[in-house]
Amino acid sequence: MPRTSAKTSAKTNDRQDPIQLLTPQGEAVSDARLPFDPADVDLPALYRDMVLTRRLDTEAIALQRQGELGLWPSLFGQEAAQIGAARALLPSDMVFPTYREHGVAWCRGLDPASLLGLFRGTTLGGWDPRDVNFNLYTLVIGAQTLHAVGYAMGIVRDPVGPAVSAASTAAASAVLATPATPAAPAAPAVLAFLGDGALSEGETNEAFIWATTQSLPVVFFCQNNQWAISAPYSVQSTVPVAQRAAGFGLPGIRVDGNDVLACLAATRRALHTARTGGGPTLIEAFTYRRNAHTTADDASRYRETAEEKEWAAKDPLARLHAHLVATGAADSAYSAYFAEIEAEAQTFAEGLRARCRALPEPDPSLPFEHTYAEMTPELSRQLAEHRAHLASLQEISGPSGERA
């Protein structure tokens, strides 16, 4: 497949400058379109989130290369978009991810080893969405947008709000809420993540229509990383993602997806609008997928090196680190803080590797038992046949697995 130049892939995206509150050099700036006070958040905590999330991603790739995982979709370069959006959530809000929201899962208090189980093949899901108000990963492109809309319909029509677990509450309180965010919202909101490729799917367009016409409390957060596998965004649309929102009658906002503050501010405002009856919002986080689509992909076949170098200079972790240093992070206390984060990341990585390899093998009955809430007669019959088949194989091979 011929490569697409950086100029071509970025042509459509550059028509509207995204809102930026933190420059690539680490300078805090203001934008009248999105008022925000950096003093309202714990910036070192945001930096820690991004560092540990990136380390999770790095270790997962290494585990896949070592044969411990079958596949891994990297988030490298998208840490600010995910952490910023996730830290805008309240404990009662519900999240519907794709298969790449590892940073959001981290912020919701999900055990990272649960994420690895899905790609190791030891589980079909990995967690109960009700425990942390974080739905299961969705591999079908765009399907989660309709799931999110359905859940938002339930919020509107069911006066009883969802239960909130202690883990979700603790995770969501790690970063301070702004005074503009109500302490006791009337109802929870829904945050649905999608990539730019999902915009070409019918499910996503249907979700936008349902959400808008019924004024549902859902926020669509599109991480426009500019590549739907090997297809650049320019072959999907002639206008930026946020501009497409107008066609569905919902507001759209475009932010720098490598700016954790802009992503946090935009998502907070959109979620507040949703909670207070203002309906849905489409957020475009203009970012870049610095690794291949998954570990099974070779991005060098369709991307130019110059484009990758350009985005490396906009690294989300580097810019927040620079801001912390420029605003006093170079003193002895903050220097120790950075060292502590690196040490924590190393310990975290070592533990993650060990826990990945220790994930239990799944019981062969699980696919039958968890297809429906209650076992149907037909599934019971199939399960009995399956168990009998496995037993016959055991008789042939013997306990050691060798053929008798």
Image (cartoon, rainbow, N blue to C red):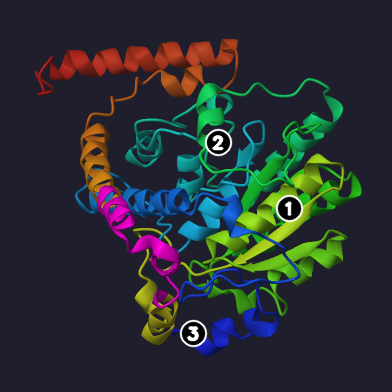
Q: Is residue 21 above or below residue 182?
A: below
From the top left corner, tell me how far across and down residue 153 is, in percent: 81, 35
Q: Which residue is mark 1?
A: 269
Magenta segment boundaries in residue numbering: 312-340
Marks 2 and 3 sit apart, C-alpha to C-alpha, by 43 Å
- Amino acid type, callout 3: Thr
* 243 relative to 76 in the view: left or right: right
Note whether residue 317 is visible: no
Question: What separation in Å lies between label 1 and label 2 (alpha carbons)?
Answer: 17 Å
> Which sits in the foreground, 309 or 41?
41
Quarter occupied by residue 260 = bottom right
Q: Is residue 269 above or below residue 352?
A: below
Where in the figure is residue 222, as x and y percent of width and height?
63, 59
Residue under circle 2? 173
Residue 97 visible in rendering: yes
Q: Residues within 10 Å of mark 1 (few under 14, many from 20)?
A: some
Residue occupying image coordinates x 58% and y 55%: 39
In the picture, the quarter occupied by the N terminus is: bottom left
Local SS, label 1: helix
